[in-house]
Each structure stands twice: as C-alpha cells, then as structure tokens.
Amino acid sequence: MLISLGWNVKHTQDEHHHFLKDAARLMFDHIKLVRDWSASHGGVYVPVSESTPPNEYLDIDNRDIAVSDELTLTLINPAYMTRQISELAAHNNGIQLHITSLNPIRPSNQPTDLEREALLMFETGDTQEYSHLIEDQNGLRFFYMAPLVTTRACLRCHEKQGYEEGEIRGGISVTIPDVNTAPIWGLVIGHIVIGMIGIALITNLSQKLSASYKKMHQQSIIDALTGIPNRRHFIDRLLAEYRRASRNSTPLTLMICDIDYFKLYNDSLGHLEGDDCLVKVAKSIHSSLQRGGDLCARYGGEEFIIILPNTDLSGGKKVARRIKQEIAALAIPHPNSPVGEHLTLSIGVATEVHDYPSQYKLIKRADDALYRSKQLGRNRIEYDAHDHNASTSSEIEELQDKIKQPG
C-alpha cells in the first residue's frame, strides 16, 4: 500500500505538472502565432495614444506616420505587441507574460534569475522548454519558458545586434499565479482507508490462522480420547526436563501406570465402557498431580506415564500412593479381574539423581519396574531395581495396603 501510494502520488504530481505545462505552452504558442503574423507583415500601425506611445527603442525608418494633424500612426513590432498583450493578461487574469533576452534592447526586458537560467539552457541546447513550480510568500505559481528563434522577419529589428537567422535571440516566460497543488489528499485518504481495511482483514485472518494452528498443535499433542497429552508431547517434554535436570543436577522421577487386566475389562463390558474407563483414569491421575510442572500423558493403550521434575524417590512414592488411592476411590467395577472387584493399577517408578546417561534409559528403568510389578501379582507399586532399599520398601508398603483393605 505504501508503494502504491508513493507511485500514485508521484504519478498525480507529474500529471498535474504536465497539465500546467500544457496550459502554459498553449499560451506561449498563441503569443508566438500572433507574433509570427505581425512579423510576416512587418508590424502593425496603430494610432498613437497615451497607452500606446511610439516605441523609443525601435530604430527603423517610417516608425511613425502622420496621417493628419489629429492622427499619427506608430508601428507596433512583435516585441511591443507582446508587451502590451502581457499587460492585458496581467490585468485580466494575473497571468504574467515576459519577453526577455540575454541581450535585450529595452532595459526593462532584462531577465530574472530563473529566466536567465532557462535562457542559458536554451543556448547550450540542454532543453527546448523550461518549467518550474515556484512557492514563496505570494503562493504557488507555475513558471514556463520557451525560446524565440530568429527568423528573416526578425532581422529588420535585430540585425544590428548581430543576430543571424536560426539563432536563439531570447524567450517568452509564462507565469500562472495561484495554482492549486496536486490533488493527492484523495489518494492519501483512499489508501489509508484501503490500508486499514487490509490490515483489519489481515489481522482477522491472522487470528483465525493462529487459532487454527493452535488447534492443530493441540490436536497433535493431546490424546483425542482422554484429553491429556499424548506420547509425542511426552517425549518432547521428557527431553526438555531431562536436560534441565542434568544441567541443574536435580532429581527427575518417572512412573508408568498400567490398568490391570484391561483387555478382560473390554471383553466383558465392551469397548465403549473401556473408553469411558480410560477417560476416568486419565482424569484421576491428572488430578493427583499437584504441581504445574508435573505431566501425565497417555503412553499407549491402557498405559499412562508421569513426569515429576525436581522430585526424588521419596516424592515419587507419595505421588504413586496418591494415584493408587484416587483410583481406588473411583471404585470402578471390574467383573473379571483376578486381583479384586474394582479396577486397579500397576505402577513402576524410576528416579534419576546423579548419572543422567539418557532419558530413554530412564524410561526403560521405569518400564522394568512396571514389569516387575506385574510379575509380582499386579495392583502394586514397584521401584527401580537400582535402589534395592526402595524395592524392599515397596514390598512392605504393599503388605501394609493389603492389611488396611477390608476382608
């Protein structure tokens, strides 16, 4: 829009200048046409009057002719005629016509600085016409000037000055007063309006595009069924948290939860009930996480994986026990479960504290702990085998949980 505005403003200003130039050139051509007619007849005799006295600078024979005692005629040559026409034009519409030369016969025909500049350019052949906008205390005026070429008829008056036929002997300037500036405000306002509409449309489309991108991004990282992050987002997040833990030497705990005998649950109650069960479990695990930096994601099928940044094994134990308690509180019936009447979880926990070899090794350790939990009867929490004390304590905790259970 700015490029378009700049181009249109420049084009409008050029067209405005060309219009003024054409108008001034038309005036010059009319004056020159009348001068050529007068020169072709050797001038025109008119009665001498107060407004038309004999031309004292015209040194030729028969300049004045006495017709009678009451009537004397004087010769009006093209230069004198141009001066009288310029006086009429200035009086009627303010347009200034000035015949001038670098070597004028009449002193008042001396060129102005702008006219001198134009005459010098004419003589060197740099241009055949000259135009310029003048802005001063008198307002905005348009100046135009073109050269006068010596013809055979001109030599009658100017041969004594040394001019030869075909030479430039001077010029006539045309100054048009009170010209208007180029009409660019309409262009400016129009472009501003179009620009604002364009910006509004771009902003609206940008917001829609941003919302669509955000929606697509959410769809790419959120599990469609459970509404929690998916495996892809978990991998990206784990990599970031693992690097942060390694850089700051802070503990990082990972746990994998698996719904016990979920295939039997689907087979007995159907896949719709199975999907509803997954949603309830996901919400329950997510609500068990009390810090904003903790993450629960669906790892696959009936498995959920949890990242606990800046959490040691002791903190991981508390979260794991809280998750089991939340799931137990749901009391989701599981008719064919070998471990009880209600839905249960097996959980594997691993904590990285010192070495930080690889985030995938941490996943493997948590998965191994989950596998051991399943091997030992399910519905229990097992910890990474790297910590034997933790493994032993898990067995004690499972016994305590069973003692607390009714029956």
Image: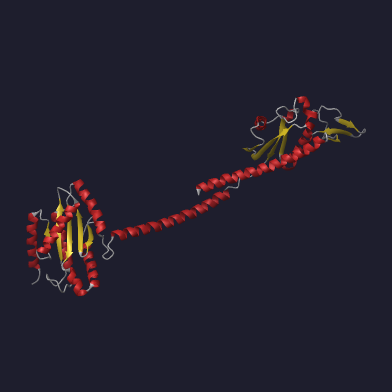
Residue 186 versus residue 172: which sits nearer the camera? 172
Query: Which percent across, then down, holds residue 304?
Result: 20, 62
* Viewer can see residue 253: no
Q: Left of 261 or right of it: where is 205?
A: right
Q: Is residue 349 above or below residue 146?
A: below
Residue 287 location, quadrant: bottom left
Residue 98 location, quadrant: top right
Q: Left of 388 or right of it: where is 214?
A: right
Q: Is residue 201 above or below residue 162?
A: below
Count of marks, rendered view = 0
* Viewer can see residue 213: yes
Q: Left of 89 or right of it: where is 207?
A: left
The residue sitting at 78% across, 31% down in the picture is: 152
Colour scheme of this structure image?
A: secondary structure
Q: Is residue 116 above or below residue 251?
A: above
Q: Is residue 34 above or below residue 123?
A: below
Q: Residue furthest right?
A: 68
Residue 93 versus residue 266: which sits nearer the camera? 266
- Work out which quarter of the rendered image holds the C terminus and state it: bottom left
Query: Which percent across, then down, holds residue 316?
Result: 15, 57
Query: Which percent across, then down, holds residue 14?
Result: 60, 43
The residue sitting at 15% across, 47% down in the picture is: 355
Query: Which percent across, then down, holds residue 325?
Result: 15, 65
The residue sitting at 25% across, 72% down in the picture is: 272
